[in-house]
Amino acid sequence: MSRHRYRRKVVIPIICTAAAVAGLAAAIAVPALARPAPPRAVAAGDVLAALQRDLKLPLDKVKQRLDSESSAAQRIRELRQGVGDSYAGAWFDAATGGPVIGVTDPRQAARLRSTGVESTVVTHPLTTLAAAKNRIDRLAATAPDAVTSWYVEPKNNDVVVEIDPAKQDARTTDFVTRAKGTDGVVRVQRATARPRPLADIVGGAPFTFAASGGQARCSIGFAATDSGGGKHFLTAGHCTEQGGTAVGADGGEIGPITQSTFGHDGDFGLVDVTDPDARLQPAVLRSRQSVVPVTGSSPADVGSTVCRSGSTSGFHCGEIQALNQTVNYGNGKIVRGLTRTTACAEGGDSGGPFVSGGQAQGMTSGGSGDCASGGVTFFQPVGEALQRFGLTLVTSGG
């Protein structure tokens, strides 16, 4: 990254680690024409270190896994269409280091194995699982708070409905009965903790906005541009649903909050960057001194590693557990299309970016647990937000 002049603030697609919050103003809110040393353009070592810490693997195993995930994703893309209606989903198997493709036709399974790809024969094709999940989505308006989420689980060839037993009541039983239908693909599972949107009410963070009860803080997600060259950044929709203006860490206005979706159709929001001195960076901040370049937005598969950053807890990694999960945050806020991960997150991390390698994956929506005890975190896939808003992701490739 070339040396350049900062004026008031630099808009970047992520914010600093929790440990560096106290020093954030010094890094961003500097006098006009000051020339602080820019962050390193490549932080492969930092990402590897985070994966080592969060996956509890030695360095050589982390490198081997990343190479295996890349190869597996390519093989899945090449072979998926060839199995036709028999396709039942695919995932990365960390134990074997390769992809697994589920099919309902034993002949297709044998053909896949002959190419060196592991395959398992299951009962239900993905179309049946997706139809069952869509049936539950249509019931979403009647879901009680005890029903925390539902999603397709390709490894078990079923659809999981998660229940908070502490809140289970007659309405829960009625909902589950209707959700199960007659196709025999729905399984009820106990939720370990209730998911929540990951925003909190504090001031002086990388971007704040007016909310009921005071100022709320969230994290910048990804930089993007529109067809006319206008500058924007993506974040979580529950951070933007009240509108207003996004304010940077230095107290200066970044720009107006102009779009927000938080509910049935997803959890993503848009801020227009109107500060003429702001510069969009194709990167995710790993620490105050290093960034992870964003090179594209190819979605990662179930079982793949993924990392996220946020203004509270910093940079953490985990694995993708499920795609297209529907999450009930309570109070009628039920969100479809989220990706479930084992990466931890905390309040204020909402809106921050998830990446797999250099590929943008999505913006932090919510979750359960924290980075001391671990937990589950969901993200809104970035592709849907880009398409809905008609934007182009800012990448290091231009």
Image (cartoon, rainbow, N blue to C red):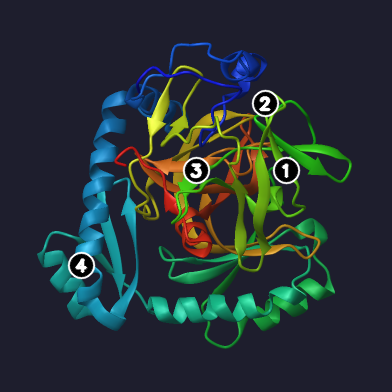
Crowding at mark 1 (Cα within 10 Å: few <14, some 14-19, many 20+): some
- How far apart marks 1 and 3 lie (CA) works out to 18 Å
Q: Secondary structure at mark 2?
A: loop
Between discs 1 and 3, the one toward the N terminus: 3
Between discs 1 and 4, the one toward the N terminus: 4
Foreground residue among 276 and 317 = 276
- How far apart marks 1 and 4 lie (CA) works out to 47 Å
Front disc: 2 or 4: 2
Instruction: Kindly identify the residue that appears in the image at 35 percent across and 20 percent down.
Output: 2
- How far apart marks 4 and 3 lie (CA) works out to 31 Å
Q: Secondary structure at mark 4?
A: helix
Name the amino acid type tagged 3.
Answer: Phe
- How far apart marks 2 and 3 lie (CA) works out to 17 Å
- How far apart marks 2 and 1 lie (CA) works out to 13 Å
Crowding at mark 4 (Cα within 10 Å: few <14, some 14-19, many 20+): some
Name the amino acid type tagged 2.
Answer: Ala
The image quadrant where one finds the N terminus is top left
Residue 249 is marked as 2
Compared across the picture, whether 214 is left or right of 366 comes to right
Compared across the picture, whether 6 is left or right of 124 comes to right
x and y, in percent, of residue 190 in the image: 66, 58
The image quadrant where one finds the C terminus is top left
Residue highlighted by disc 1: 245
Q: Quadrant of residue 211?
A: top right
Residue highlighted by disc 3: 222
Name the amino acid type tagged 4.
Answer: Leu
Residue highlighted by disc 4: 79
x and y, in percent, of residue 196 in the image: 71, 49
Location of residue 154 with respect to 267 vertically, above or below: below
Foreground residue among 337 and 180 = 337
Between discs 4 and 3, the one toward the N terminus: 4
